[in-house]
Image (cartoon, helix red, strand yellow):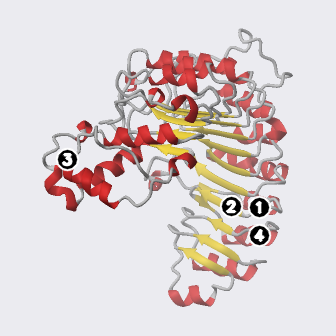
């Protein structure tokens, strides 16, 4: 790779050393398709700081003053003919202080850009304004606006205009995280992204995947825009709040239209989402819904009808992870019988606190109910994971195993303390086929290496 370094702030000795060792002037950049600015900048800094150039580097006051990073980008943009993917990742002390879309050759190399992953708007460089004039074929747009990222007064407007300039956005991802998930934060620091959501109206014919991460909707959840996306396949709502009222009358909404009819993947994770919105999504997605992840804990508003609505509306579920309470367990047999295509089922106790499973109450299962759950397991089910403190008799467990017709590979009763060595013996005697994994990690069973070795033909891996 060849490009001129004479205009950089690098010491002459370093430039001469590079020029003496370069062996090819072949234009490899012409074949470049993906450009990660953060990785280039990090690799450049590491190269300068390595041991060989330690004495030289000490004379450079700040890596930001060194133009080698921009020289790389200049070379790539100028000589590449068809870059498809550009990304720069979260960094709070960004060295990305120039506008990539204003470099020579950008109007050619970036005109077919289809995937753009960006972090705020570093410095006053009008990144999105320039991008709107060159790259209008973005199909996958990822915007990270973590608290503390570089942002200008006009950034949100510029992002909105950038979205409006696009012809066919298919995947849209936006994240306004204020901090890590494990700590409490000042939620008032969240941005009002309403202007960005309104711009999605221009992409309703092509949008198929949408991710909202850590968003304060300021009581203006973009239900109207989403309901018009007839090709929407995936919707992920994680850690969001302040949805506001979902007024079906004002939105001229009815259950006979085509909204969400193609939705196959739905994730609602730790979000204070209105019940009416959950019901609409489950009802409207109907037979199209294949993958459902519904995670709610004691911190969020409690929706206790998830199984009932799935029974009535979503018979084609394949992978399901849900949080339920003890009162909903009674609906499991009917849910399992209605979900004939179910491949993976993971059930959690919605009362669970992070890393505090011991605080959960023990749930005593009726013998007949537990036996019925075993009998109702779908014949395609491969993975059954119960993360609740179920307590069941050894007789009902025997019936559960005998009644089970599912070809299970994974069986997990991780927090079911009643499971001891006698239960394990019942399992071994009644298994119809081998298991790849049995998880009884916090149970009473004490299985030494001899027992494990003796039964590994039936159970390949035991967590206990």
* Residue 11 marker: 3
* Location of mark 2 (residue): 384
Question: Of callouts 2 and 3, which one flags the residue occurring earlier in the amino acid sequence?
Answer: 3
Q: Nearer the viewer, mark 3 or mark 1?
A: 3
Horizontal side of residue 87 vs 384, given as left or right: left
Disc 3 crowd, CA 10 A, few/some/many (<14, 14-19, 20+): some
Residues 373 and 202: in front is 202
Horizontal side of residue 99 vs 57, given as left or right: right
* Location of mark 4 (residue): 399
Question: Of callouts 4 and 1, which one flags the residue occurring earlier in the amino acid sequence?
Answer: 1
* Location of mark 1 (residue): 381
Q: Secondary structure at mark 4?
A: helix
Q: In the rendering, at what x and y percent does residue 202 appear?
A: 68, 18
Q: Secondary structure at mark 2?
A: strand
Question: Of callouts 4 and 2, which one flags the residue occurring earlier in the amino acid sequence?
Answer: 2
Q: Nearer the viewer, mark 2 or mark 3?
A: 3
Circles 1 and 2, Cβ within 8 Å, touching? The answer is yes
């Amino acid at each position: 790779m060849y490009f001129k370094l004479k205009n950089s702030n690098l010491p002459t000795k370093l430039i001469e050393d590079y020029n003496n060792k370069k062996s090819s002037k072949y234009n490899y950049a012409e074949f470049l398709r993906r450009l990660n600015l953060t990785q280039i900048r990090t690799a450049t800094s590491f190269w300068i700081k390595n041991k060989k150039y330690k004495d030289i580097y000490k004379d450079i006051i700040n890596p930001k003053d060194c133009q080698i990073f921009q020289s790389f980008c200049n070379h790539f943009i100028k000589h590449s003919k068809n870059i498809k993917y550009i990304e720069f990742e979260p960094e709070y002390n960004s060295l990305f202080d120039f506008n990539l879309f204003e470099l020579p050759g950008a109007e050619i190399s970036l005109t077919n850009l289809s995937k753009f992953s960006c972090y705020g708007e570093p410095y006053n460089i009008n990144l999105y304004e320039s991008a709107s004039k060159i790259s209008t074929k973005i199909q996958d747009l990822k915007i990270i606006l973590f608290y503390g990222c570089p942002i200008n007064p006009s950034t949100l407007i510029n992002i909105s205009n950038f979205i409006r300039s696009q012809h066919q956005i298919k995947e849209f991802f936006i994240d306004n995280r204020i901090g890590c998930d494990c700590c409490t934060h000042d939620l008032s620091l969240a941005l009002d992204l309403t202007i960005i959501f309104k711009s999605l109206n221009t992409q309703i014919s092509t949008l198929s995947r949408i991710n909202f991460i850590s968003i304060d909707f300021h009581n203006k959840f973009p239900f109207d825009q989403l309901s018009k996306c007839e090709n929407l396949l995936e919707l992920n709502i994680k850690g969001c709040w302040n949805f506001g009222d979902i007024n079906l009358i004002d939105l001229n909404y009815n259950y006979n239209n085509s909204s969400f009819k193609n939705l196959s993947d739905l994730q609602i994770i730790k979000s204070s989402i209105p019940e009416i919105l959950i019901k609409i999504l489950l009802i409207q997605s109907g037979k199209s819904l294949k993958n459902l992840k519904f995670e709610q804990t004691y911190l969020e508003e409690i929706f206790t009808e998830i199984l009932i609505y799935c029974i009535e509306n979503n018979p084609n579920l394949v992978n399901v992870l849900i949080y339920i309470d003890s009162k909903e367990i009674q609906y499991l047999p009917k849910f399992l019988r209605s979900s004939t295509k179910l491949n993976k089922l993971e059930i959690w106790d919605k009362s669970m606190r992070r890393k505090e499973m011991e605080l959960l109450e023990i749930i005593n299962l009726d013998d007949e109910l537990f036996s019925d759950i075993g009998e109702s397991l779908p014949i395609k089910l491969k993975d059954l994971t119960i993360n609740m403190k179920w307590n069941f008799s050894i007789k009902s467990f025997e019936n559960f195993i005998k009644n089970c017709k599912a070809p299970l590979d994974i069986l997990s009763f991780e927090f079911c303390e009643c499971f001891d060595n006698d239960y394990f013996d019942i399992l071994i005697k009644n298994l119809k086929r081998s298991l790849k994994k049995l998880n009884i990690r916090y149970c009473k069973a004490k299985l030494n290496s001899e027992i494990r070795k003796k039964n590994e033909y039936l159970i390949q891996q035991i967590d206990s």
